[in-house]
Image (tube, coloured by chain):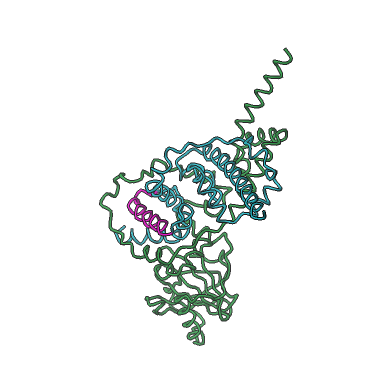
Chain colours: A green, B cyan
Amino acid sequence: MMSNQSDNKQDKWTELHESLQDLLAGYADNELDEQDTLIIEAHLSGCDSCRNDLARQKLLSERLEVIPAQKITSSLQQRIDNIRLEESSDIGDHKGISLDKTFISFKTWLKDMSAQPIFAASGWAFAIVLAVVISLPSVWQIQGNRIPMIDDAVAEYHKMNSMVFPAVNKNTDIKAPVNFPEGRTLATWATNIAGEPAQAFAVRSGRNIIFQYKINETVLFRNPEVRQAIADFGNYKQRSNKVDVLALPLTDSGVLVVGPAESLPEIKKIEF
Amino acid sequence: MTGLDRQKRFQQLTHPWVGRLYGVALRQTSDSHIAEDWVQETLLRAWRDFSQLSEEVTIYAWLLKVLDHVVADDVRREKRRHQLAPIVTVEDKYLIEHPCSAPGPFDETLKAQTNDQLMDAIQNLPDEFRRAVLLRDLEGLSYLEVAYILDIPKGTVMSRLSRGRRILAAELLKLETREKSSNIESLK
């Protein structure tokens, strides 16, 4: 009788042990609900095999996380740039991949995403970029490879910086692409950045004059380093020759903000 | 929205993610030309289905889902369909008996292996586990995002990861044993 009870207990433990093995990844990744977490923790306290498995999973996951991804090749970039997007004749026709059936409700998505980092912060790509801009610190690139749009913007900044701008803007219609506290737009003019037309703006920020260049998105995304930085951090920053340059994506264009080193406003204070 | 506006909108939304897409593609083939083809095809399909993109999903997750279909159509269908997924438990022989299976020595084993060796081991995982490990551990996506991309429930993501990592751990331990044996042979 005693032996039967003991066998039963062992069977139940084995059954539980087997079923919990599929939850170990969820425990390692903090993806379990409270109840499952309690069950797993109770089991782990008496199971060496599962404890070791859990430790291996965590170590493996941490090791894989730091494997760097390959960067985009110039040949692929060229191919992408050369893609001709024809208007699809079957818009609304669901012959292709049926995406709408698998969309998860926005509320559920946000609820489950709340603990996730930047990537999961919002639903629509531009919102992601904005979220990233606000929440992730990016790094200053010390000038390495030449980037034509940056070179043009900095060259014009050096040329025009000695100009005397009006103390205040009399034309209230002038509005720079991005705004920041106490920034006052003083003047605007047409210019050329990386071979494409652009609009320049002079903005007073405290004692400094900061230039903004509204450029088209093709120019903004032309350089792979800039593209990667915008994908990773939401912006690209370069420091060269005592001048800081910040590149930001806008809804249908881009902007380069150029000013003396360490004079640019913090990203979180910028409105665009 | 005019056709030109739609094109601009599409390019603006997809452009920042092309580099990362390529990275994901290249983790599934050693041939950079094939990876490039997949990314190009992904963008073309994404453009074709652009009108179906909902605000309820992030653009990157959507592009990864399209890429997953592109890869499936290209290679996975024939190559891996009939591959049987092994069930590996925590009592697997290698995981129990191998001298390096305890957490400390296992950590050393992982550190001793190069990124290429690890990527090769991942490539050799059965497809369903490989995709889950790739999206979670290398791309850092949440379980919900992986579930969306692979069209499987969140619980299945969890079990595939548990088993996939277990298989991977066992394979890396086997690799360690082979390397040690060949080192000993070369010293003889």
- Please state the horizontal and vertical placement of residue A3, each as a whole percent of the image: 72, 16
Q: In the figure, is residue B80 to the left or right of A28?
A: left
Residue B30, placed above or below residue B133:
below
- Please state the horizontal and vertical placement of residue A183, each as a whole percent of the image: 53, 73
Residue B47, placed above or below residue A53:
below
How many marks can you see? 0
Q: Is residue A61 magenta?
A: no
Name the main secondary structure of what is drawn in magenta.
helix
- Please state the horizontal and vertical placement of residue B100, each as a whole percent of the image: 68, 45
Name the one closer to the observer, A212 or B37. B37
Residue lying farthest to the left in this orientation? A89
The magenta segment? B32-53
Q: In the figure, is residue A215 to the left or right of A258?
A: left
Q: Is residue B49 magenta?
A: yes
Name the one closer to the observer, A43 or A8. A8
Name the one closer to the observer, A163 or B130. B130
